[in-house]
Image (tube, rainbow, N blue to C red):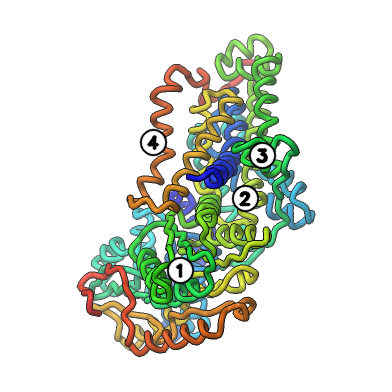
Amino acid sequence: MHLISGLLNSRHSRPVVAVLVALVAGSACGGESAETESTFRAALLTSGPVSDAGWYAGAYDGLLLLEDSLGASVSHQQTATPAEFDEAFIAYASSGYDIIFAHGNEYQDAAIRAGEQFPDVTIIVSGGGRVSANVVPLIFRLEEGSYLAGMAAAYMTESKVVGMVGGVAIPPAQGTFVAFEAGVHAVDPEIEVLEVFTGDWNDVAAAKEATVAQLSRGADVIIHNLDAASFAVFQAVREVVDDGAVAYAVGMNSDQNAVAPDVILGSAVIRIADAFLATAQLWQDGRVGGAPIYASTEQGVIDFVFNPALVDRVPAEAVDHIARTKQAIRAGEIEIPRVIFVEGEDEGR
Amino acid sequence: MSQVELTLFLESAVRLGIPLALAAMGETITERSGVINIGLEGSIIAGALGGALGALAFEGAGLGVMSGAMAGMLVGLVFAAFAIGLGADQIITGTAVTIGGLGMTGAIYQARFGATGTELSLPTLAPVAIPVLSEIPLVGSALFAQAPTAYFAYLMAPIAWYLLFKTAWGLELRATGEAPAAAEAAGVRVRLVRLVATLFGGAMAGIAGAHLALAHAGTFAENMSAGKGFIAIAVVVLGRWNPILVLFAALFFGAASALQFFLQALAFALAYQIFLAIPNMQTLAALAGWVGKSRAPAALALPWEPHR
């Protein structure tokens, strides 16, 4: 079904219009070289809708930030199948885009192919695992935020059971769950951690029932790694809370605290827009290529933020412990477990 | 599983089965008239968005469901205009309608609620427990403490069965699906019957989508139909084009889906993809054995040109 939705979105939504407008503008002002050289063109590829208030929404905000802050002319396309990945790269690269943000691990192989074909284009693959001269993974150390979320969950659970609901078990998603579990066990090794993958980032019905299944196993804090289906996780938690139970959800990828302020304890955050901006600035300085770019708590890109509406329920000891741990992670004093997926990267880094 | 867990599992199974049942029941009527509407997915997602927008506009989930039905029927009308009106290939038209439905709903949602999306606070269809029936041990709460749309599905199954097999109207409908030339010779307006059957199917799929948004998820999300239209078409085959069997087939599918989440939550140390494949493997097994002897309407997917 991803195939179909991708097809369609790449044909009908604004992105294509944006490409066309850009082409027209480019040909119209071909003579004014100063005009065209003062800016650059940035494109974003996503394989899901940007209306997920999370992973893809953050990337879309990042694209708009490049437009506002750096004067880039920008375009977005939603693609789904590997065949469409290739087509989208070719379309953008051949129509003069300078930097393409491919927002997801799934783009890594198509990015390498396109990178060989178009050596002048720089492709940034979020969570990618493959590196070349002009194809660069942008690795978000979301494990660090997820670890802190695990600690928060461990402090808040009364049943000593917590749950994780994921979409597809790609390595970056598995990494966040491994780290969450480690964070839970850093506080209390006795806590049971459940894991369910639904196989679909947007299937709200599946995400709802997966959450219900975990709640029924006694879990009272549920973290997700989903896209638009995350709404169903919040809804499932809300329903048991309305019935008088005490339970929390944990947001992921973007600051989702305001999405469901009544049930979200906090969010493991990637400030994707900031990371895109920093990456584009590095690229403008000619410093992007041949090696992965890492974004972590060190630069403030990764974080765990409590929901201000519910933080008064969190013991001061927990808030303090998490703040201290965040400092320790930033200082490199704590090694967060990860799933290794970037080529050439060893366990040590 | 304990008794409590078994009850929760059955409740989950029915919740997952109801949208499939609603969509598949409508598709059963459509297919009995000789039209295969692959665009069902488009009607479901339109129903989900129509349901959400209607519930917000009219400040009530009931009117939201009506809006969802209208939206689903509208998408069915687009399909009918090409597939029945112009005699276009039904598979290709249906695929286009699905793609168009997913895209249009995404565009409308983003235009209305912002590109980066948010969780909507919709008036929801709360479960209504039926006295006495919902007290039945084990299956009572699963079957009889559900949203009103579930009871609509239970009622529609025998009503659709009666209309299809016990009335002159049903005979005409089945005739257009089996032998349209003979039906036309007997005075049946083949394309009109097919249009009505397709609009009915679209409306039922729209109600299925509204159920997803208003009774299940409590919000709209792009692509939230997640392939349920295609699964519903498989459910029609599994239910042998019989509305009552289709209801049971849909609940069977729901149980298979629910099982995968409960098995994962029980922490079986197996690759989760194996659990996700369970419903499909069950379907294959069922298709190979149980449904072996049934067959599709003879004129299914064949366009009809009137000879008058």
For mark 4, give the secondary structure.
helix
Query: Residue B72: horizontal and vertical position, in percent?
Result: 65, 42
- Residue drawn at (38%, 36%) of the image: B281
Which chain does the numbered disc 2 sit on? Answer: B
Q: How far, Cα to Cα, is label 1 from label 2?
A: 44 Å
Which chain does the numbered disc 4 sit on? Answer: B
Which chain does the numbered disc 1 sit on? Answer: A
Residue B216's label in the rendered image is: 2
For mark 1, give the secondary structure.
helix
* Identity, as a three-letter code, of the amino acid under mark 4: Met
- Residue drawn at (58%, 28%) of the image: B28
- For marks 3 and 2 on the same chain, the one whose residue lies earlier in the sequence: 3
For mark 3, give the secondary structure.
helix
* Identity, as a three-letter code, of the amino acid under mark 3: Ala
- Answer yes or no: is residue B97 visible: no
Which chain does the numbered disc 3 sit on? Answer: B
Residue of label 4: B281
Q: How far, Cα to Cα, is label 3 from label 2?
A: 11 Å
- For marks 3 and 4 on the same chain, the one whose residue lies earlier in the sequence: 3
Dot 3 and dot 4 residues touching (CB under 8 Å): no
Above or below, B206 against A251 in this view is: above
Q: Quadrant of residue A307?
A: bottom right
Residue A23's label in the rendered image is: 1
Query: Residue A54: horizontal and vertical position, in percent?
Result: 51, 68
* Identity, as a three-letter code, of the amino acid under mark 2: His
- Answer yes or no: is residue A201 visible: yes
- Residue drawn at (41%, 38%) of the image: B280
Residue of label 3: B150
**Would you call the spot at circle 2 few (<14 residues within 10 Å), some (14-19), or many (20 or more)?**
many
